[in-house]
Amino acid sequence: MMRLLRLLNGPHDLGQGRAFWSGMALLAAAFLAYPAIASSFAASNVAYYLLNIPMALGLSLLWGYGGVLSFGQVAFYGIAGYTYGIVAGNFQDFAWGTAAGAVAALLAAGLSAAAFGYFVFYARVAAWIVPILTLVLALLLSTFLGLTAGYQWRVGGIQLGGYNGMTGIPALQIGGVTFQDYAFFYLVAVVVAACYIALRVWVNAHRGQVLMAIREDVLRTELLGYDVRLEQLRAFVLASVLAGVSGLLYVQWGNYITPSAIGLQQAALPVIWVAVGGRDSLLAVAISTFLLNQLSYVLSSSGNQSALVIVGGLLVAVMMFAPEGIIVGLGRARWLRALAPWRSAVGPGRPGHGE
Amino acid sequence: MLPELTSVLYQFGTNAAFLLLSALGLIVILGMMNIINLAHGEFMMLGAYAASFAVHRGIPFPLAIIAAFFATGLFGIVLERLVIRRFYGRELGALVTTWGISLILAQGALLLFGPYMPPIPIPGGAVSVGVYSFSVYWLILIGICVVLVAGLTLVYRATPFGLQARATMQNPTIARSLGIRTGRIYMLTFGLGAGLAGLSGALLAPTTSIAPYMGQQFVAPAFITVVVGGGANVIAGAVGSSTFLSLIETPVSLALGTFYGTMALLVMALLIIRVLPAGISSLGARLRPAIAR
């Protein structure tokens, strides 16, 4: 137990010490108390801003900590979403039907990532090939799902629905609880917190350190006796399962999923959230994911078509002027740290690594 | 027998020409600068837009294509000076940044010019052999591919720019110490790659609808061609990879449909990199180490 806590407080993320964790506890309490003052609509919106965080954390692990960039995390998001829709939809009359759907969804995301990742990582390809191939995967999956219109494309009683997507996806039901409205908000909040804590332990534990060693120097890590291919594949599968968690939450949020949720524009978003926050800090990525989702939601719900131009511009600007990310940059700025109530023990800032 | 054979050859030819045209600009930039330009599809879109503008102002189509080459090339040079040159040596950074640029270009084109541009009619008619008829324009495109590859070979093998570019590609530090202005080489290479993308976009514009997100349809074929081709030898990689992939794609598309043809490309790419991680062009370098590149 003490060991886990020590790992949780470890140096490979922003924020350590009693004051920081008290702040985090306050934040968690604020989220848990939020439904008491919010309308069901507002709570649902906040749940939407939160539910993409697991996917972003997974990409942060892969890219920021592992030095492997994937542009296709939405593919696994979509695989999990569609799988849940199929399994949960077919078995929703059973008590365990939706729970089985959730398990099947995560399994599908993990297994497809393992199969795809095997070809990519065991080939030891150049760094730029992984993002290209994952992007093509997402694009083709989205194209394929767009072609599945019509009655012949159905699994059991569930139609895939082509461009209109799959509708009427049931909410998760465990025991007597159906996760809708406020219950869904709590589900999202708890899952997101659990993902953050687990990943933070992971990156500070041995596996995470091996991953960072690979990012710094592949050959050296290999000479120390680690199987680089296996470690990268493991990180890729973990990241994809996390993307699956987000996909799973997404289909329950809106009870539908369309191929455009996996399209080229959606594929860009996780990369933007992670790059803007700062890819080698899980906390920064979680914060930026929440804020940028809110920004796009507000922009697009006001009918503003320039949302993509704005986030695209933000991405280019960040990559040019703050390549380590805005929040990480602020978190490591000396003048700001002097003001902070806690003394951050983050190692020396290393902008530009992992590229 | 002859008509069937012609038809199959025509299918191979058009598929290979499509793959080559989609990938040419991308592979020139990758091979020379080790930068993947994710805004490649949007550069093709810009080329198609430029051609559409020109054609509908009364400029003949061949001139419009040349105008598209120079317009997109110029745009590429400006972009290289402003943004891309900061990312030399940072592969993944360049990848992410050009993706941001592609989002801006596609959505920006939608905001500026609306959802559709006036289409360009397909020039040339059709010729028929037996019961099959073939589009003359696609036959011209196949010819243009041959001319483009020959032209690029000439530029890289027989001009001072080509010599300096190959030197820069092999070893930028030594090239610089010999007085080659490598920054200028990179700028021109990026401009050439962008221009070729624009040229391909303009050439393919009559065969498709001209819209802000038209670049997306080139993403999968272009990137798979580049992954399979590899960056070791730009021209041989592009030609070898597009020929090889069209051999795979054509029968699958004919039997199952276009989507499964593209799907077969992805599966093929995964299998190829498992055997040849550096692509088909590394095969030549392996067989002939002495005259590699």
Image: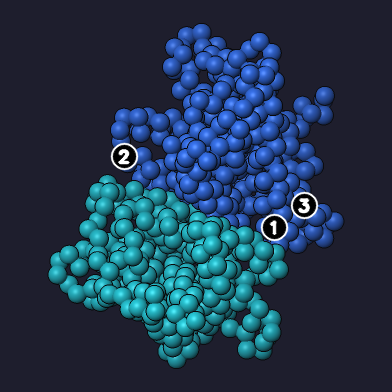
Q: Secondary structure at mark 1?
A: helix
Circles 3 and 2, Cβ within 8 Å, touching? The answer is no
- Asked if labels 3 and 1 touch by Cβ distance under 8 angstroms, the answer is no
Query: What residue sits 60% from the left and 15% below the top?
Result: A178
Label 1 sits on residue? A119
Judge by depth and name the residue closer to the eye, A189 or A278.
A189
Q: Quadrant of the N terminus of chain A?
A: top right
Residue A250, percent from left and from top: 53, 30
Q: What residue type is disc 1 on?
A: Phe
Name the subunit of mark 3: A
Tell me, yes or no, whether dots 1 and 3 are on the same chain.
Answer: yes
Task: Tell me the blue chain.
Answer: A
Position of the C terminus of chain A, as image quadrant, is bottom right
Which amino acid type is marked by label 3? Answer: Leu
Asked if one can make out residue A16 in the rendered structure from this viewpoint, the answer is no
- Front residue of this view, candidates A244 and B34: A244
**Chain name for mark 1:** A
Mark 2 residue element: loop
Q: Which mark is residue A16?
A: none
Q: What residue does disc 3 label?
A: A230
Q: Label 2: which residue?
A: A305
Left or right, A250 with reference to B110: right
Rendering colour (chain B): cyan
Q: Chain of mark 2?
A: A
Please tell me whether residue B11 is drawn above or below residue B261 in the rendered image.
Answer: below
Give the residue type that dot 2 points to.
Answer: Gln
Res. B128 visible in picture = yes
Q: Quadrant of residue A223?
A: bottom right
